[in-house]
Image: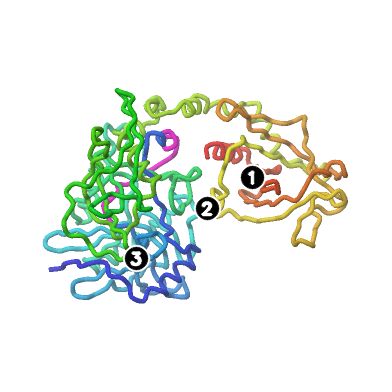
């Protein structure tokens, strides 16, 4: 009889972690963290092309193959190593599963890669085994692929299926399986998508010979975005976890006398307003019910406990909860995460039917005034006339050699967009210091004492064409329109550059014809704009403008 013992710490883990850090360029755990689906997120998710996968009740690990080989493309068997968050997110730990016989996983014929998944143990017919459910891939044949869309990454992940099937036949105590994703469109008319997806996944597990899986919700995943380290709520990268109201849990520190604390050692409080009485309450977390007397030995000083939210006691001003398990693999949730889960529990998205549906009327109860405006006006953002004007700017001039050089700049409404939104997409990036000189025009500062004219010949600079400016109708949301400004390269005059100073530019090359430029002037303001040249596909620009407006 096989009995699976535990995940065993790898004693000599330094070479594994060095290879991990070398590949990922990260010192901490790179794995992304889906955010809890709240009612305020419904619109942003609904408008996306998302797929869905069951959330298995397991332990999160990154799996790195061939971590100690110098040549990532070398053939032959490779050892799997499993990396967790170390309880803090920065103190990484390396594990390997250990069989009761003392055996560790044998080398496998996988290509060099880094996988993202959850480890699940199950017992069936007296045998206990581990299943590593793979739901993403971060590196393939030694190359990081996090900048690719999820659809592209999953396509690469599918190529590992043959290795999983072949190797699983040789080991009946440790299996590697690629977790299936289900398209939103298949469940758009479902009365209860969660139950239907559970049924589908349970049937899939039965085909593989696994026990009935323990699930605790769904992961809803935007298929068009790159992999994002840390919380997935930044920018337009959306990955949400949804749980039934009765399954909502939080990870907290268990203090003295079983007092529930945050990761900073302080009590968590939540501001709650009773809808009937309009009375405000400051709620704290109650001591957990059903807490076992035996507590695990913890390497760190803090003991983290997973708690299920069970009810409100307004008389005592507490949120009632019950013990689920101790989490030696995680640190306590951040306060932002706790707030998100509590919000989702008090004001739940009870049924995903409306989220999966295509009809915007189905989600109106979740929408803010701002979001309703976006739904109502989504079709008239680009009028036929400004579409035609933008297409004209994108058209290349066949006699361009005889005409002035042109470009156009797209200025977006005054809204903050983190530069990390583009750094995470692995766009080619350049950082330049530029200045405007009356004698040299636009100048690139390679060093403090070295100036290079940006354009050959006489001093030149870009001059706006005020007659053909295009304005897109975004006033109803942002109070200001999107402005597209045609520009021409002309000789620079002293008056034109008199008030121009040094500018730090971070330039992201989106296509061969389009850049996104972040400026950080000396006065401390941070601005960004899109810079495009004739030859760009106008449809590409329409998509880019929409993306930026929705960030």
Disc nearer the start of the sequence (1/2)? 2
Q: To which quarter of the image does residue 405 belong?
A: top right
Disc nearer the start of the sequence (3/2)? 3
Residue that badge 3 annotates: 82
Badge 3: how crowded within 10 Å, few (<14), some, or many (20+)?
many
The label nearer to you, 3 versus 1, is 1
The residue under the point 35% across, 38% down is 270
Q: Nearest the camera: 424 or 110?
A: 424
Q: Nearest the camera: 189 or 4?
A: 4
Residues at marks 3 and 2, CA–CA distance in whole angstroms: 24 Å
Residue that badge 1 annotates: 526
The residue under the point 11% across, 63% down is 126
Q: Nearest the camera: 284 or 358?
A: 284
Establish if 463 lies above or below 153: above
* Image quarter of the N terminus: bottom left
The residue under the point 49% across, 61% down is 144
Residue 154 as seen in the image, left or right of residue 3? right
Dot 1 falls on a residue whose secondary structure is loop
Residue 80 as seen in the image, left or right of residue 468? left
Q: Nearest the camera: 64 or 40?
A: 40
Residue 424 is labelled as 2
Residues at marks 3 and 1, CA–CA distance in whole angstroms: 41 Å
Q: Which residues are magenta?
A: 43-58
Badge 1: how crowded within 10 Å, few (<14), some, or many (20+)?
some
Badge 2: how crowded within 10 Å, few (<14), some, or many (20+)?
some
Establish if 440 lies above or below 37: below
Q: Tell me where residue 266 appears, x and y as whole percent.
A: 35, 49
Query: CB atoms at circles 3 and 2 under 8 Å apart?
Result: no
Q: Tell me where residue 165 appears, x and y as whole percent.
A: 29, 62
Dot 2 falls on a residue whose secondary structure is loop
The residue under the point 24% across, 65% down is 297
- Residue 49 inside the magenta-drawn segment: yes
């Amino acid at each position: 009889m096989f009995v699976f013992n535990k995940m065993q710490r790898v004693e000599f883990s330094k070479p594994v972690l060095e290879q991990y850090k070398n590949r990922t360029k990260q010192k901490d755990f790179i794995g992304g963290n889906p955010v809890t689906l709240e009612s305020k997120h419904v619109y942003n998710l609904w408008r996306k092309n998302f797929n869905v996968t069951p959330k298995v009740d397991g332990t999160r690990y990154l799996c790195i193959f061939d971590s100690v080989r110098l040549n990532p493309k070398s053939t032959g068997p490779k050892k799997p190593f499993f990396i967790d968050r170390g309880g803090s997110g920065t103190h990484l730990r390396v594990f390997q599963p250990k069989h009761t016989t003392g055996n560790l996983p044998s080398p496998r014929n996988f290509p060099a890669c880094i996988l993202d998944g959850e480890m699940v143990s199950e017992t069936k017919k007296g045998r206990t085994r581990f299943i590593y459910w793979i739901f993403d891939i971060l590196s393939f044949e030694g190359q990081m692929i996090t900048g690719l869309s999820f659809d592209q990454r999953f396509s690469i992940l599918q190529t590992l299926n043959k290795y999983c099937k072949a190797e699983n036949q040789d080991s009946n105590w440790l299996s590697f399986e690629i977790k299936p994703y289900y398209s939103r469109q298949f469940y758009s008319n479902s009365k209860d998508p969660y139950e239907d997806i559970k049924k589908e996944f349970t049937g899939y597990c039965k085909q593989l010979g696994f026990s009935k899986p323990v699930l605790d919700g769904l992961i809803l995943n935007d298929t068009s975005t790159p992999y994002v380290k840390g919380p997935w709520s930044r920018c337009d990268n959306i990955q949400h976890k949804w749980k039934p109201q009765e399954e909502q849990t939080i990870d907290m520190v268990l203090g003295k006398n079983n007092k529930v604390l945050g990761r900073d050692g302080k009590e968590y409080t939540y501001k709650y307003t009773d809808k009937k009485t309009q009375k405000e309450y400051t709620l704290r977390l109650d001591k957990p019910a059903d807490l076992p007397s035996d507590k695990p030995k913890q390497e760190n000083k803090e003991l983290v406990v997973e708690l299920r939210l069970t009810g409100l006691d307004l008389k005592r001003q507490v949120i009632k909860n019950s013990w689920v398990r101790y989490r030696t693999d995680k640190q306590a949730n951040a306060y932002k995460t706790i707030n998100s889960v509590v919000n989702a529990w008090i004001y739940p998205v009870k049924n995903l039917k409306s989220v999966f549906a295509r009809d915007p009327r189905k989600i109106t109860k979740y929408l803010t005034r701002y979001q309703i405006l976006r739904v109502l006006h989504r079709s008239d953002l680009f009028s036929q006339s400004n579409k035609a004007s933008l297409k004209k700017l994108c058209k290349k001039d066949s006699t361009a050699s005889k005409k002035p050089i042109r470009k156009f700049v797209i200025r977006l409404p005054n809204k903050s967009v983190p530069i990390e939104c583009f750094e995470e997409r692995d766009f080619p990036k350049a950082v330049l210091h530029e200045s405007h000189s009356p004698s040299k025009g636009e100048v690139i500062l390679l060093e403090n004492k070295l100036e290079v004219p940006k354009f050959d010949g006489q001093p030149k600079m870009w001059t706006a064409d005020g007659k053909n400016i295009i304005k897109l109708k975004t006033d109803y949301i942002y109070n200001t329109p999107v402005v597209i400004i045609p520009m021409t390269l002309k000789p620079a005059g002293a008056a034109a550059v008199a008030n121009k100073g040094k500018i730090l530019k971070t330039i992201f090359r989106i296509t061969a014809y389009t850049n996104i430029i972040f400026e950080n002037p000396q006065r401390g303001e941070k601005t960004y704009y899109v810079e495009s040249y004739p030859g760009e596909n106008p449809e590409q620009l329409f998509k880019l403008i929409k993306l930026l407006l929705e960030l």
